[in-house]
Image (tube, rainbow, N blue to C red):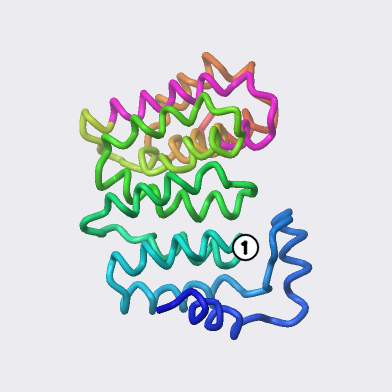
Amino acid sequence: MTLDEALETLKAHIEPGRAEGQAKYHKQTSKVLGIPNPALNDITKIWRQTLTIAERVTLADQLWQTDIFEARVAAAKLLTQARIRPDDAAWTLIQSWVPDFDSWAIADHACMAGSRRLIADPTRIDTVESWTSSGHMWTRRAALVITLSWTKQNHPKPADLAIRDRILGWAAGYVDDPDWFIQKSVAWWLRDLSKHDPERTRAFLDQYGERMKPFARKEAGKYLKT
């Protein structure tokens, strides 16, 4: 499938009058076509089923480079799959997108794809850790969003617990960051963790909660029983 063919398929699902509202909601300066997310899901599901891994990586790269909002979302969805073998090319491509993140929607879709690659090879956490010191806010935020899978295990193995504690260390380094999105990412990670590991969540909030923004502290403890 060529890029032109892919864009033609996407544009066939444009809903008139939708683009302006989407651009405002997602705070997009890039071009927005006005395609609903369910349509993107359906399109990319077919592409995942019919294209080889190499073809998907190539198309995802081309779609991302258009700097069209829905094309970038589609690029991420093309690579959002648990089993991709081999997956080095997919992981390398996803990493290359991180400096381009400019909104939560683009970042979150790409991080959903990236999280599968981290689960497939947890040693890639080393790369993600380097993002925590980036001067680019969206890159720093991505370090927590892409690792949310480590909040969700009810019975983590020792290696996963070590990763969980490592990421909590990153979150501790973020508590004094004044940026709303960084504070929100810490709150999101802790809120999800609290459903499966309330003890670690409470310990973190006992130590760092007073330094967090009030909204983030409240969100982080949303599911903790008093």
Q: Position of residue 76 (x, y in %)?
A: 46, 59
In this rendering, would 106 be left or right of 61?
right
The single residue placed furthest to the top in the displayed view is 207
Q: How crowded is mark 1: few (under 14 residues within 10 Å), some or many (20 or more)?
A: many
Q: Residue at x 73, y 58 (%)?
A: 25
Q: Where is residue 131 in the image (x, y as percent from the top left)?
A: 48, 31
Q: Where is residue 21 in the image (x, y as percent from the top left)?
A: 77, 67
Q: Which residue is drawn at 43% across and 27% down?
A: 130
Q: Nearer the viewer, residue 170 or 212?
A: 170
- Quarter where residue 125 is shown: top left
Q: Nearer the viewer, residue 110 or 97?
A: 97
Residue 174 located within the stretch drawn in magenta: yes
Tell me: residue 4, above or below residue 133: below
- Quarter where residue 53 is shown: bottom left
Tell me: residue 28, above or below residue 223: below
In this rendering, would 53 be left or right of 66?
left
> Principal SS element in the magenta part?
helix
- Quarter where residue 146 is shown: top left
- Total numbered circles: 1
Tell me: residue 174, above or below residue 53: above
Q: Given the image, on which type of amino acid does mark 1 rest? A: Phe
Q: In which quarter of the image is the N terminus?
A: bottom left
User: Helix, strand or loop at disc 1?
Assistant: helix
Q: Which residue is drawn at 38% across and 64% down?
A: 58
Q: Residue at x 53, y 62 (%)?
A: 73
First to last magenta residue range:
161-185
Q: In which quarter of the image is the C terminus?
A: top right
In this rendering, would 182 be left or right of 207?
right
Q: Which of 16 and 210 is in front in this view?
A: 16
Which residue is the site of mark 1?
Answer: 69
Q: Where is residue 16 in the image (x, y as percent from the top left)?
A: 74, 82
Residue 137 located within the stretch drawn in magenta: no
